[in-house]
Image (cartoon, rainbow, N blue to C red):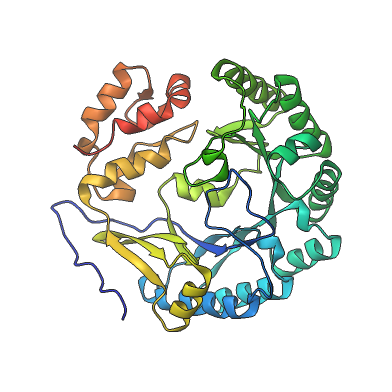
Amino acid sequence: MSLPKPAAVVLPGRRLASLPPLSLYVHLPWCLRKCPYCDFNSHEARGDVPYARYVDALVADLESVLPLVWGRRVYTVFIGGGTPSLFPPEEVARLLDAARARLPFDSEVEITLEANPGTFELARFRALRDAGVNRLSIGVQSFDGPSLKSLGRVHGADEARVAVQAALELFERVNVDLMYALPGQSPEAALADVSTALALGARHVSAYQLTLEPNTYFHRYPPALPDEDCAEQIEQAVHARLAEAGLQRYEVSAFAAPGHRARHNLNYWTFGDYIGIGAGAHAKLSLPERILRQVRHRQPQRFIEAALAGDALAEQHEVAAAQLGFEFMLNALRLVEGVPVAMFAERTGLPLAAIVPALQVAEARGLLERDHLHLKPTAHGLRYLNDLVSLFLPD
């Protein structure tokens, strides 16, 4: 049975004058091997993976959400996982063709696919490009063999270099994912990873500190990580090296040369809308008088069966007005340059007055700065982002 639509709760002044940009997120859940630090909804590919049937389910899932997005244009697509580069390119092409047939894509749509160097084949990357993918996000994590082994990665240092080099030759825009503060890692080793990415020609780098997330192997059996002071030293060195190379930090963990920012992620951080299809996928969809959150069934086989039966949703709810200020700021404050003040009302339907008390506290603590046109986190606020964001939690 399909979940009922939440009843619209119309509050005074709570109506969106226009709808935000729309993206499409597609979750492909299978990977070669579950990494010990990974808390994503990913599942090791064992036996015959039902790629074609899963794409059938994705298309059915997309069709079920169409009534909520009629007439809206898709500006970005992100195919994440798991390891989407495991999927046969012909199935990726079939998925994108089906999506284009059901939704109008912008003429300059950004279509990103996550890739693992362990699945690299030149012919596969070329076929993915021919299928319509125009941006590749490569989960390198490190170019150092022992570090990759400590992270449980299936690829080696040479595979990482070859995959990045090939991606940069085939795709105009490539994101290289790196992790730092790894087990036993020194600042010099972290900088060597960054220098390798830059020497290969990377123009967008996402640099994340390794954290021990709940429900992961590393959380149950923690490795020996650099202490807090060393991790901070590594982070500062990594950020400085990327800046020296002309890659501007535009989000907490993202650095890009001009023209290479990730448009899909920018839509998340500016509280844009996104359809989410696939096992465990999340969605945010704005209607003139309410904002919906959706979650799909998490287990791949359960998702396939449910989606093909027209019932992919595991959960759907309306975002409460009291929660909207926090949800907006949770995203916007990740951006180094912040957002226009007017965007708050445009994306939430609420007046700025709804968060002014929290803004004033954040300013007083040196975590945020604003004028009548713009608001953004300070350098101190970016460093203590959790403390800053928590100020906007509803009472």
Q: Is residue 42 above or below residue 156?
A: below
The residue located at (71%, 27%) in the rendering is 190
The residue located at (85%, 60%) in the rendering is 122
Residue 202 lies, in percent from the top left, at 75, 40
Front residue (pair 131, 28): 28
Front residue (pair 296, 272): 296
Front residue (pair 1, 93): 1
**Viewed as shown, does residue 233 lie left or right of 71?**
right
Residue 230 lies, in percent from the top left, at 61, 17
- Count of marks placed on residues: 0
Question: Which quadrant: the N terminus?
Answer: bottom left
Q: Is residue 197 above or below residue 40?
A: above
**Viewed as shown, does residue 181 lie left or right of 159?**
left
**Viewed as shown, does residue 240 lie left or right of 40?**
right
The residue located at (46%, 44%) in the rendering is 269
Judged from this view, the residue extending furthest toward the left is 12
Regarding residue 144, the answer to whether it shows in the image is no
Judged from this view, the residue extending furthest toward the bottom is 309
Question: Which quadrant: the C terminus?
Answer: top left
Front residue (pair 274, 139): 139
Regarding residue 233, the answer to whether it shows in the image is yes
Q: Is residue 104 above or below residue 211?
A: below
Residue 83 lies, in percent from the top left, at 66, 58
Residue 152 lies, in percent from the top left, at 69, 45
Asked which quadrant contains residue 373, the reply is top left
The residue located at (78%, 68%) in the rendering is 127
